[in-house]
Amino acid sequence: MEFQKIPSFTVNHLVLLPGIYISRQDSLEGHLLTTFDVRMKAPNREPVLSGQAAHTLEHLGATFLRNHPLWRERTVYWGPMGCLTGFYLILKGDLKPMDILPLMQETYRFMSSYQGEIPGATPRDCGNYSYQDLPAARGEAASFLRVLENLEADRMVYPQ
């Protein structure tokens, strides 16, 4: 059986830089959903997130976004990419990267300074609750926050 290459596999990962990109937009039951590629690492050119750091960022990011007073009702999904170079964020609405840049700065600021128990990291609440690394997650969030604070337009549109 032949498969058509899905759009995310047509992005040139050899030149992709950390940033925020629109991965796709879909209509579902009358709602437009925008999927963002929140790319923390330059694919194939720098070390990826550790699994434990990504898991912790997933818990922290999801908790923050789903409790955000302005964005909680629009947040559909926050989760790591399988390649561990970033996260997918799905939000309701016809949105552009610049629309969510302040939200991402706020999210990564929260994650980079988070102290305390990781939300949902208990045997009852998570299928692999001990697979966490808060210090590494804070470091990765702080590193990407520096990118977000100086994000240029070329890091908000997929390269050709």
Image: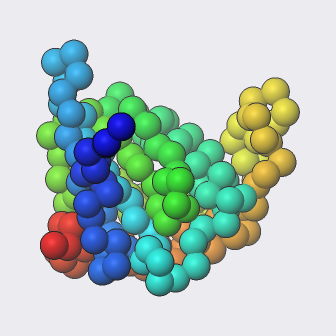
Rendered view: 127 above or below 52: above
Quick check: 68 left or right of 92? right
Give coordinates of residue 160: x percent, y percent: 16, 73
Is residue 81 depicted above or below 150 in this figure?
above
On the image, the x and y values in percent for residue 13 come to: 34, 72
In the shown orientation, is residue 138 left or right of residue 13?
right
Residue at the far bottom in the pictured view: 45
Query: Which residue is found at the position 42% from the left and 77% from the top?
Result: 42
Q: Kindly identify the residue that appears in the image at 75 percent across and 61 percent down.
A: 133
Residue nearest the observer in this picture, 146 or 133: 133
Q: Residue lying furthest top in this view?
A: 29
* Residue 88 visible within the image: yes
Expressed as whole percent of the image width and height from the top left, the position of residue 41 reads 46, 73
Q: Quadrant of residue 150?
A: bottom left
User: Nearest the camera: 121 or 158?
Assistant: 158
Image: 129 above or below 51: above
Number of numbered discs? 0
Q: For the point 65% across and 52% down, which residue is it?
A: 55
